[in-house]
Image (cartoon, rainbow, N blue to C red):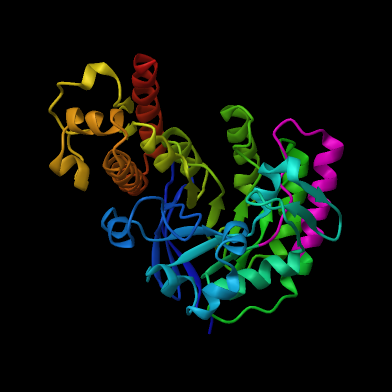
Amino acid sequence: MSMFSYEIVKECKQSGARIGRFTTPHGVIETPVFMPVGTMATVKALSPEEIKETGSQIILSNTYHLYLRPGHEIIKAAGGLHKFMNWDGPILTDSGGFQVFSLSSLRKITDDGVQFNSFLDGSKHYFTPEKSIEIQKALGSDIVMAFDECTAGDTTYKKAKEALDRTVNWLDRCSKVELPENQIMFPIVQGNMYADLRLESLERTVPYAKCGIAIGGLSVGEPKPVMYEMLDVLQPALPKNMPRYLMGVGSADCFVEGIARGIDMMDCVLPTRIARNGTAMTMHGDLTIRNAQYKDDFSPVEEGCDCYCCRNYSRAYVRHLINTDEILGGRLLSIHNIRFLHRLAAKIKEAIYADRLLDFRDEFIAGYEFKNKQEK
């Protein structure tokens, strides 16, 4: 009997968005869900206990970075990633494909695999689909991602088709690496910003999806309406009996828009990255806390928020920390931003249960965009 399963608890009649239960060896994930990113086996500046207190159910780590430092064999010797980083919940590991894309000046892609230079010391390395999966096996993550080729938002049709074909060929090779019963592989749909290629990629990818499928190659520089268009194209054809993971998306508006289009799982470094730069996410738009208007504002970062930051500290204090480069400022806002997305997920679930997610989306986006324009 599989250690992974997914059941739909409720489907919104207005949008098709779902509430689900995704069972993994390290716990049940209630979807829709935001997944904080711990690239180097840590969500930057936060302890596992702090991450858990925000309500996080699952976190991500990255194969490419952990392969370079400290090395997957060291993590394997430590008992796997869960023990190494003291996280007892589910873990998803990215395959390294996106890092290959984002470090484009340091790599060479062939049909066999990818040669790249380490961003640390310039040393040469070679990833094949098989090697990516073997590294993830050693890391011991619950969810393993297939090795894919991600392309930029302005890629030509010809290049996008070549990358699609290569991704499917690599997926077939990934699928031949046997995983233990406590790991499962998510295949990744590519196809760039071309509707026919997206649908072709999905059709060729679905046979490899056992209990989860991912959508990659979005939020790579294209306008948000284009991303939504691609999700609209895919939604009717996506398999219903498994979680759908939109990779690398984590702004509040995209989170709501993605779930309204049938997405169940999302991840992004954005919430913690902007936190370290002094930006707080709220239900009514982003706040640039470092701005002078908050210097004597002794209200919480967000009224009504139950996170550790908002329960204990004021905007004025957090602004002081950010503007004096105190580490605590970025930590507090990171806690707040992660908790914010979990609170937003809870509101989305309420709207799904009430069969009014599209109404909620329109109300939320209108207020969120208005506030962001004010901030600018």
State the residue at coordinates (17%, 37%).
304
Numbered marks: total: 0
User: Which x, y percent locates residue 342?
Assistant: 33, 48
User: Which x, y percent locates residue 330?
Assistant: 32, 40
Q: Is residue 188 left or right of residue 275?
A: right
Q: Which residues are magenta?
A: 146-171
User: Which x, y percent locates residue 235?
Assistant: 60, 46
Measured along the vertical axis of the image, is residue 162 above or below residue 170? above
In this rendering, does residue 247 appear at all? yes
Measured along the vertical axis of the image, is residue 271 above or below residue 100? above
Report the residue that reaches farthest toward the front: 121
Measured along the vertical axis of the image, is residue 17 above or below residue 1? above
In this rendering, does residue 183 appear at all? no
Q: Is residue 222 left or right of residue 261?
A: right
**In magenta segment, residue 355:** no
Quadrant location of the C terminus?
Answer: top left
Report the residue that reaches farthest toward the bottom: 1
**In magenta segment, residue 163:** yes
Query: Residue 336 lies in what quarter of the image?
Result: top left
Measured along the vertical axis of the image, is residue 376 above or below residue 61? above
Q: Nearer the viewer, residue 312 or 248?
A: 312
State the residue at coordinates (65%, 56%).
96
User: Which x, y percent locates residue 256?
Assistant: 43, 38
Q: Nearer the viewer, residue 269 or 180?
A: 269
State the residue at coordinates (36%, 50%).
45
Q: Is residue 197 left or right of residue 182?
A: right
